[in-house]
Amino acid sequence: MKLDLTKTDKNYYAAPANPVLRTFGTYSYATVTGSGAPLGPAYTEAVATLYRAAYGAKKLAKAADQDFVVAKLEGLWWVESDAPPLTIPREEWHWKMLIRLPEYVTADMVSGATFETLTEGESIQIMHVGPYSAEPETLSRMDAFMQAEGLTMNGRHHEIYLSDPRKSAEATMKTILRHPVRRISA
């Protein structure tokens, strides 16, 4: 039986319509890092490279009787500016695209991408339903929650793409938005 992390780790792959605080441990990923507009040529090639690496690791794991379903595409996003991120042209965005891997996948099983671990710890998580262009509204709700709870960002903006934009209507696309946070010192 194949391991499907999206079904076995609901804390990670599910979120309510309103912001909640959750804690995440350390997870392994295949990653590629770059910059430029989402869906631009550099991004598109990087994602293709990432999937080749994830399916290569899957093939090796399956040969060792540890088959798994390749997990959802994820992304960490940031800008190199103090300006509000969404005011920066998309061509200047930086990203690290990730695919989460089972615990039994090792660095030597990942070829063509980087094998990394990530620990986000305490984080705000929410389900965004709709097009990516409507995310600012959901992000505003996350910011209000952070302020009300006395929290501040403690890592990069994280997105988990539950829907494939090539196959889903924009209005029904589901994306988990996550912000690692820490308590503001009194």
Image (tube, rainbow, N blue to C red):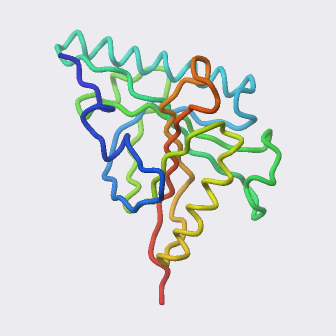
Give the side of residue 177 with respect to residue 101, left or right.
Answer: right
Quadrant of residue 140 within the rendered picture: bottom right
- Closest to the observer, 104 or 133: 133
- Closest to the observer, 97 or 161: 161
Looking at the image, which residue is at 51% across and 57% down? 179
Q: Is residue 103 above or below residue 124?
A: above
Residue 139 image point, x, y percent: 61, 56
Residue 81 image point, x, y percent: 76, 59
Looking at the image, which residue is at 23% across and 18% down? 2
Quadrant of residue 61 within the rendered picture: top left
Looking at the image, which residue is at 49% across and 52% down? 178
Residue 8 image point, x, y percent: 24, 34
Give the total of numbered labels.
Answer: 0
- Closest to the observer, 177 or 42: 177
Residue 124 image point, x, y percent: 46, 59
Looking at the image, which residue is at 28% across and 31% down? 7
